[in-house]
Image (cartoon, helix red, strand yellow):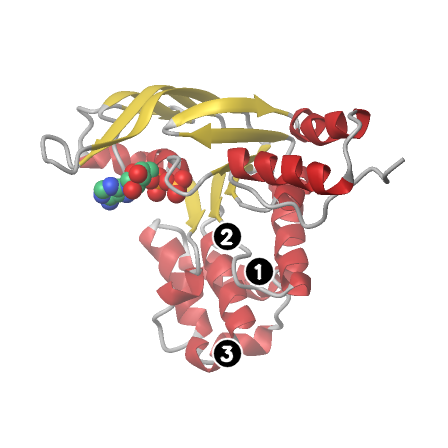
Amino acid sequence: MKVLLKNIEHTYMKKTPFEKKALANVNVNFEKGSFTAIIGHTGSGKSTLVQHINGLLKPHSGQVTVGGHTIDAKSKRKQIKALREHTGMVFQYPEHQLFEETVEKDLLFGPRNAGKEEARTKKRLPELLELVGLDKSFLERSPFELSGGQMRRVAIAGVLAVEPKVLILDEPTAGLDPQGQEEILSLFKTWQQQYQTTTIMITHQMEEAARLADRIIVMSEGQIIMEGPPSVIYEKQAELQTLHLDVPEQVKVLKQIEQEMGVTFSSYHLKPEE
Ligand code: ADP
């Protein structure tokens, strides 16, 4: 499903001393089945942007279109709900949102709310659990007796159970060990490819963004300041290879790039000193 954001503005705490323009005239499209990573400093507007796509926030001006539904500042709750039906959002630390007595009940909650047929959902649960790396014996267990990594998987399965056409991921691997991160990310990639889900992921990990996404968006102060395939962003690193700098200088430049983009590189590709 295609997502279009047109001239989006959003200001928090309007007409108070704390007024903050979080988005200023943002224009961006997400094609059906694409995988976009959004990077940028804390406070640059990433969360505010994605919350417009699943109808958690309404634009103060501009329009948000998801599939055939368009909302603007004047839209009523019912119209916003229609938009929410197509989007799934994995929040940071989604395991904090588990609350039912059993994993099965937790997994049924979202689809039931979305009006999906219960029998069909139930039938799909073992397959869904398998996709997130858990077997069906987990269905009867309490989510609260699981490990942190297992809880995260259950929470993610709960979002996927709704079969969203648009999937929003807000730092989905935060706090996981490298192996857990790898497994969770490959599951999102599999899901996107299998169902042509439009996937939008906020991350601070440059490698994560470059490996999974076909496009990277860099945000700063409520605006999109750079946009392109991962290679465009990596060109900045490649440029470094052509400069005659000693190692401390190279590290300094890379740290500057990290600073500018609000990301971290898992390792630096340095040119050996001549
Ligand atoms: P990011 O996700 O990139 O960290 P956010 O979208 O969370 O950025 O925040 C953008 C700006 O809006 C920041 O200055 C932040 O302090 C402010 N902001 C975010 N949420 C609220 C809120 N609920 N009330 C007031 N200001 C907010």
The image shows residue 175 at horizontal and vertical percentages of 53, 63
Question: What type is the residue that disc 3 sits on?
Answer: Leu
**Closer to the eye: label 1 or 3:** 3
Kindly identify which residue carries mark 2: 160
Location of the C terminus (image quadrant): top right
Q: Is residue 251 left or right of residue 91?
A: right
Q: Nearer the viewer, residue 248 or 142?
A: 248
The image shows residue 168 at horizontal and vertical percentages of 47, 43
Whether disc 2's CB lies below 8 Å from ligand 1 is answered no
Per the rendering, the mark at residue 54 is none
Q: Quadrant of ligand 1?
A: top left
How many C-alpha atoms fall within 10 Å of the one at disc 3: few (<14), some, or many (≥20)? some
**Closer to the eye: label 3 or 2:** 3
The image quarter containing residue 63 is: top left
Q: Nearer the viewer, residue 245 or 194?
A: 245
Q: Nearer the viewer, residue 115 or 136?
A: 136
